[in-house]
Amino acid sequence: MNAPLLAFHDVRFGYGANGKTVFQRLTLGIEAGTVTAVLGPNGAGKTTLLHLALGWLKPQGGRITLRGRPLADYGRGELGRLIGLVPQSEHNPFEYSLLEYVLLGRAPYLKPLEMPGPQDVRIAQDALARVGLAGWEGRSIARLSGGERQLVLIARALTQEPRLLLLDEPTSHLDLGNKARLLALLRALVAQGVTIVLTTHEPEVAAGLATHLVLMRGGQVLEAGPLPDTFSGDRLSAIYGVPVKVAQVDGRQVVLWG
Amino acid sequence: MSGDVGSLAPAPAAPAAVRATPRARVDSLVWLAALLLVALALSLFVGRYPAPPLLAPERLLTDELAQRLVWNLRLPRVLAAVLLGMSLAGAGTVLQMILGNPLVEPGFLGVSQGAAFGAALSIVFLSNAAWVVQGSAAFFAFAGLGLSYFLAHRLRYGGWVLRLVLAGIAVSALFSAGVGMLKYVADPLRQLPEITFWLLGGLWSVTWPQLRAILPVTLLALFVMIRMRWRLNLLALEDATAFSLGVAPTRERVLVLTAAVAATAAVISVAGMAGWDGLIMPHLARRLYGSDSRRALPAALLLGGLFSLLCDDAARTLLAGEIPLGILTSLLGATAFVILMMQRTLRVSR
């Protein structure tokens, strides 16, 4: 087994000096080329986990390493070229065009005072095309639906050309067609060697895409491992607190709940 | 996902096709700059000498008084008007971007009220010498920012932006109370009129020495804002996202914020409280040139300069006595603000 791309070693984290502890001793390894789905109820610490992986939140104990090197040792731009983040949603009161917005993803490749050039514009246009928004460059982001915005955020992360892509509930606003397209896009990225970590509330998305699963509840990792070993009705029942059954339909896993 | 590209109503700001190609708009920015230069040149001939509203250009060749007037009074004054408008509009753009709120201006964060308090304090207790009033105004403008920033760290309510704005409102209110108290204790014959004039704002006192005193700070601050204009877009994003794009959100925001406040403090120190450019011009710039601050910021600077310049021309020409600039900018600014607020496309969040 290779050394993990991203590794959490005994990570302790809580918000504020005497705020509630989110993670007590979190240990987790994400291997290169895998798709890890983080499943867990609201408040389980999924987004916190992504923000720690990003280097934005700093562990209060233990350490997080990327390619064996502590995250804290990486420079800002270097980290921006390696790790991309797709937030669940984003408020921006200004009416950017999609191209202007997606171009922001090129920032890690530019010097602090440098402006994006024609090459960056091409990459941004390409990213828009990959999420199915070709020809929408001039549209205003303020006029998009929730699902379309989510696709724009994904396109922005694509222009970062990251090796590790973190997605926070990327399918939450997407209709079935766009969900299927996004899963296909993510599979294509994995085929190009991108490692993916995503949080989701939809076990089917995890089952349809992930190679590995992290099951969380209340800041604890209940179970982590390859999908076939970890995806079961009993385990999903345990994290969500409602009866869950996993059935096979046409060779695919279907989740029945409630 | 595909399909109805043509069927949606076009954006009211600018046609989509123009927005997608940044180069297409450079031309109109150049036009705006040219317009400002022409207005600046014309403003040298606007005034009440020898008779309102215009000085005939050929008089400059013969009339020595006209030459001295244009060189010693009008030129520094119109340059100061342009700097004033540029600084306020630039600072307004910066604040709106980094606070992610299109409804803020330099008056937030305690900057303007701090400057007013500093000036009044100086007039009442220290000296009414120009450099003392200006120094004190600039000092308290920064103190207002520092205090807002410090308070925001201590507040235990809301996110960072909300805390900063709340702290700014509290600090502004404290400084206004201080100004009120100073007006109460001021000598009604000597000091109170001076405080009142300062609070109303105006550029009548600006000559070359005053302009020279604020020039380095304002030019440097404007330079920083212009150079970081694309980066401002990144600083408008939420912290974690900005970080994921290689930005140091806190450090870079503090840098542009310092530039914005320094420019504001410097121009307020010579012009008094002439507000509203900082709120309206960034809006107008975004409406005309799109939200990307690569173009919105230079546009706001040019529009701000033009607005102040024209307001000042009106202030010194319309009536026999000078109209305080702050009254004109507030009157026009507030009108424009109400019109903007009634537009369907204005959006506020966070």
Image (cartoon, helix red, strand yellow):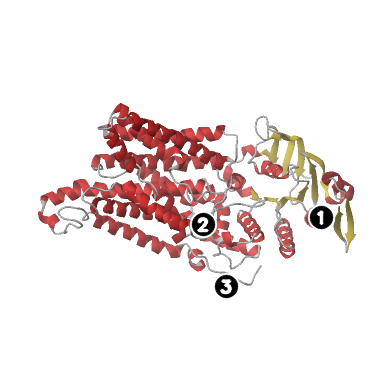
In the picture, measured across the screen, residue A95 lies left or right of residue A21, that is left
Q: Position of residue B182 (x, y in %)?
A: 35, 31
Mark in the foreground, 3 or 1: 3
Q: Are marks 2 and 1 in contact (CB under 8 Å)?
A: no
Circle 2: residue type: Leu
Q: Label 2's element?
A: loop
Residue depicted at x 29% and y 40%: B197
Residue position for label 3: B6
Residue B346 image label: 2
Q: Position of residue A202 (x, y in %)?
A: 78, 54
Residue depicted at x 52% and y 45%: B99
Name the outermost residue toward the top: B125
Q: Are marks 2 and 1 on the same chain?
A: no
Q: CA distance from mark 2 to mark 3?
A: 23 Å
Whether residue B213 is situated above or below residue A117 in the rendered picture? above
Chain identity of mark 1? A
In the picture, measured across the screen, residue B307 lies left or right of residue A82, that is left
Circle 3: residue type: Gly
Q: Is residue B83 visible?
A: no
Mark in the foreground, 2 or 3: 2
Front-most of residues B195 and B254: B195
Chain identity of mark 3? B
Q: Are marks 3 and 1 on the same chain?
A: no
Q: Across the whole image, how many numbered discs are drawn on residues?
A: 3
Q: Label 3's element?
A: loop
Q: CA distance from mark 2 to mark 1?
A: 42 Å
Residue A207 image label: 1
How crowded pointer 3 is (Cα within 10 Å; few <14, some 14-19, many 20+) is rated as few
Whether residue B6 is situated above or below residue B349 in the rendered picture? below
Q: CA distance from mark 3 to mark 1?
A: 38 Å
Name the outermost residue toward the left: B62
